[in-house]
Image (cartoon, grey):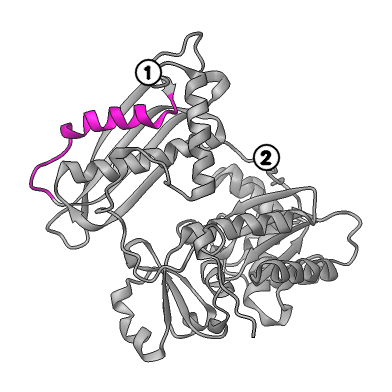
Amino acid sequence: MFSLIDINNFYASCERVFRPDLVGKALVVLSSNDGCVIARSQEAKELGISMGVPFFKIEHLIKRYKVTVFSSNFTLYGDMSRRFSEVVASFSEDAELYSIDEIFLKVPSYEENLNVFGNRIKKTVFQYLGLPISLGFAHTKTLTKIANFYAKKDPVYRGVCILEKEEDISHALKALPVEEIWGVGRKLSLKLRALGINSAKDLSETDPKWIRKIHSVVLEQTVRELQGIPCFSLETAPSSPKSIQVSRSFGDSLSKIDDIQAPLSSFLEEGALKLRKRGLFAFGLYFYLGLKTTKAGRLFFLSKFLMFPEGVQDPRLMVESVLKALPSIFKEGAFYKKAGILLINLKPQETQLTLFPSQKTFKGGSDEKYRSLFKAVDRLSRKHGKRSLCLASSLSSRWAPKRKNMSPSYTTKWTDLPVVLIR
């Protein structure tokens, strides 16, 4: 038996944890540069505010209904996600962190009453973190996803939906549109609807082998899962990423090459930190610039690929290489609105090492000195905050995204700790 635990309206709920005065009130969270809506409380959804809508299009609703607006605070959301996963993982030895706000669990065999078990998790998460969650239970991961969908959408379940009995499963599948099935989506649903497959029930009654012939093995497995046959197991070991990307839109357009150097350097430092955490080396690197065109909202991208035959993890080497290559794609007189880096061909440390690492691998050529240096850098960052020690080339903040309404980093900065007054 599987369970899927999902935080309701995650970003909005994180903001409410530290602003209890907003419980029951409409709030939205905006994307980088306060451009679009990326999260909504239930009350905001009921006002007709859509996901992804540009902020300027709903300003009249914001003012009319006094909707609270937050700029995205990914430091806060990431830390709350970490705490959430730690709390939920304590309920089972087998847990898979599926996304920032979702965790699959294998239900322990000694848990006989799933409703009691689900409500215990729900109560504990709210008590420890103040986050509201929904839980779905079923014998396959695909059915568990569907159970969670109903737990979240239908108040009758009170946040816990169990799809175990045949009649319950049949009823749930019959009412579920095919595009709501895990892994199907809108594009594939159009093809399935053209074949007369309109609901999850319809898909569950098709021949899995025929589905494999007309589409894929994965969709065949989805059909079998809808039929109650487990095909997807828990992925309890974190998989290594195939690439690492860091990008941002700028708060203001940049036109000078010196101003572009800072964000690229900062992104490379962030990418290098992710490599260090996973023990990976990058053997290839793309960097790109997005410049404004005459067409409204359109960006034209310029990019450059750099190869590192011996692999690289040292941000100093990556920054040195990128800044050296930057003039080859930079256009004078253009206005740049976005930049990013993409690290590819990632390999574990043990497959990277040559007998004698050269300066192409570590600046200065010493593996030991490199590790000592960046252990100290990471230790200082944990103690004094992100980017408390960084490369000089990344210091300019002219490119920083606009975040006019960002909440404090309540859980990661001593100076941002909430203050409680006792009278």
Instruction: Name the residue rendered at 39%, 18% in the picture.
Output: 364
Q: Which residue is nearer to you in this view: 108 or 389? A: 389
Q: Which residue is nearer to you in this view: 304 or 205? A: 304
Nearer mark to the viewer, of 2 and 1: 1
Residue bearing the label numbered 1: 360
Instruction: Name the residue rendered at 43%, 80% in the picture.
Output: 68
Q: Secondary structure at mark 2?
A: loop
Q: Is residue 332 magenta?
A: yes
Is 328 situated left or right of 358 in this image?
A: left
Residue furthest left as drawn: 333
Q: Give the quadrant of residue 216.
A: top right
Going from N to C along the chain, the mark reached first, 2 or 1, is 2
Q: Give the quadrant of residue 218.
A: top right
Q: Secondary structure at mark 1?
A: loop
**Residue 306 point in image, percent of width and height:** 31, 27
Local packing at callout 1 (Cα closer than 10 Å; few below 14, some 14-19, many 20+) is some
Local packing at callout 2 (Cα closer than 10 Å; few below 14, some 14-19, many 20+) is few
Residue bearing the label numbered 2: 237
- Image quadrant occupied by the C terminus: bottom right
- Dot 2 amino acid type: Ala
Looking at the image, residue 105 lies above or below residue 303:
below
- Dot 1 amino acid type: Lys
**Residue 385 point in image, percent of width and height:** 48, 50
Looking at the image, residue 408 lies above or below residue 326:
below
- Residues shaded magenta: 312-334
Looking at the image, residue 211 lies above or below residue 198:
above
Residue furthest bottom as drawn: 64
User: Magenta region's main secondary structure?
Assistant: helix
**Residue 46 point in image, percent of width and height:** 49, 84
Q: What distance separates the C-alpha of mark 2 from that of mark 1?
A: 32 Å
Q: Is residue 260 magenta?
A: no
